[in-house]
Image (cartoon, helix red, strand yellow):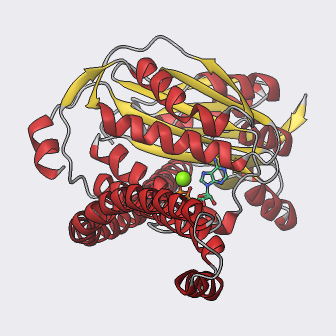
Amino acid sequence: MGETLKILVVDDDDVDRMTVLRALKSGEPNACVDEVDSAAAAAEALREGDYACALLDFNLPDGDGFSVLNDIRNSGISTPVVMLTGQSDEKMIVELMRAGASDYLSKNSLNSETLLHCVHTAIRLHQANEEKRRAEDALKQSHTQLQEAHHHLQESHEQLLQSEKLASIGQLAAGVAHEINNPVGYVYSNLGTLQEYTDGLCRMLETYEKLESLVADDEPELQRLRELKTELDVEYLKDDVRNLVSESREGIARVKGIVQDLKDFSHVDEAEWQWTDLHRGLDSTLNIVNNEIKYKAKVIKEYGDLPSVECLATQINQVFMNLLVNAAHAIEVQGTITIRTGMGGEDKVWVEISDTGNGISAENMKKIFDPFFTTKGVGTGTGLGLSLSYGIVHKHGGHIEVDSEIGKGTTFRISLPVSQPNQEQAKDSA
Ligand SMILES: Nc1ncnc2c1ncn2[C@@H]1O[C@H](COP(=O)(O)OP(=O)(O)O)[C@@H](O)[C@H]1O
Ligand SMILES: [Mg+2]
């Protein structure tokens, strides 16, 4: 061994101590040996100094070998200890080894050769154990790392699936929206004209009806007219034709809304990246959705300090709108919607929209970002809001997180990077 051997000898008997010392020095002249004569001093020395090995007399005035061993092992010191015993009671020796002694020697038969052999073996054993422990630690650590990596992979796999799903739905939506957009457009506009025409025809009919009273009662054509009026139920027809047209117009307006959602969803209408004040975006979106919210919820704003954020402003507003409308829908009678904003680190901002609504069940939680998943009645929900928002936020390199408790409410938290380092790339993939 290249470095000097540092050994602690513990014995209260001066003669015994000298014997041990001499035996050590004769075989290992360069050894550095410290001596102490009590259990307390031994424990302290072992705690302070980095001894390669300790030679410990079993019987000390202030304690026996067990107490010293327990004391140092409990405080995490693993220095190998060779026990020096007066008599060799086998049972006691087994106990000593169990308590953490590396080896034992009988004081009666002490000689330099066996003593040093014993010391070196104890040190080697100790070193091997340490190495094993280190290897185990390293193994445990890499196991944890592997587990983390696995977990990470699973997460990105799910995210990939989600965006894959969104991409294919997006393509589908773009195609459908494109096909539907035109016919819906002219049906909507024709229905407007039809409404005007029917209004005109009805007015015309009413004027004719006034003429009726001026015609002589025995006129045969008048008789036929009256029969026809009863047969066709003209009174009802006049009312209903107006209803039919305006209902159809409402229906088509709803289809137009959905087509618009689909177009937004598939990013058919591209917008510009610009530096935007998110608070202004939130405020203007609040104005737009005020109708949906005002009877149900008090809106509390807890805005932090935000820098301008580089984003596709109309799309980010769309996200705000979806979250706000969802929050309002989740509140059945009366509640609160809280909007919080703040900075997360130097280059990230976050926006939180919390409601005191009915919350999301664990089962639904897995599906809320899926396109067309909705728990709302026909006509109220399209199930596109959150998948749309998810796509938009991810396109910005951000994240969207949900925290919800049934009966208590839900918080959606969006985090966005302040700037878009790969803006060109983001644009391409938009
Ligand atoms: N704030 C919220 N509280 C409770 N449930 C919500 C909330 N936001 C979304 N959800 C649930 O997620 C579903 C999907 O939402 P979304 O994609 O916006 O579609 P939609 O609102 O048209 O149903 C909703 O139907 C609802 O069940
Ligand atoms: Mg919605």
Give left or right: position of 386 versus 85: left
Horizontal and vertical percent position of residue 100: 71, 52
Ligand 1 is located in which of the four quadrants?
A: bottom right
Toward the viewer: 61 or 207?
A: 207
Q: Quadrant of residue 268?
A: bottom left
- Name the residue at the top extreme: 305
Horizontal and vertical percent position of residue 422: 14, 36
79, above or below 98, in the image? above
Horizontal and vertical percent position of residue 246: 51, 60
Q: Which residue is painted at 22% across and 64% down in the image?
A: 182
- Name the residue at the right extreme: 62
Q: Which residue is painted at 64% across and 43% down in the image?
A: 327
Q: Which residue is painted at 53% across and 69% down in the image?
A: 241
- Count of number-bearing discs: 0
Q: Quadrant of residue 103?
A: bottom right
257, above or below 281, in the image? below
**Whether residue 221 can be seen here:** yes
Give left or right: position of 362 versus 117: right
**Whether residue 148 can be seen here:** no
* Placement of the N terminus among the 4 image quadrants: top left
Toward the viewer: 3 or 199?
A: 199
170, above or below 393, in the image? below
Toward the viewer: 187 or 53?
A: 187
Horizontal and vertical percent position of residue 348: 38, 26
Toward the viewer: 423 or 57?
A: 423
Give left or right: position of 375 versus 263: right
Q: Which residue is painted at 40% across and 34% down in the image?
A: 317
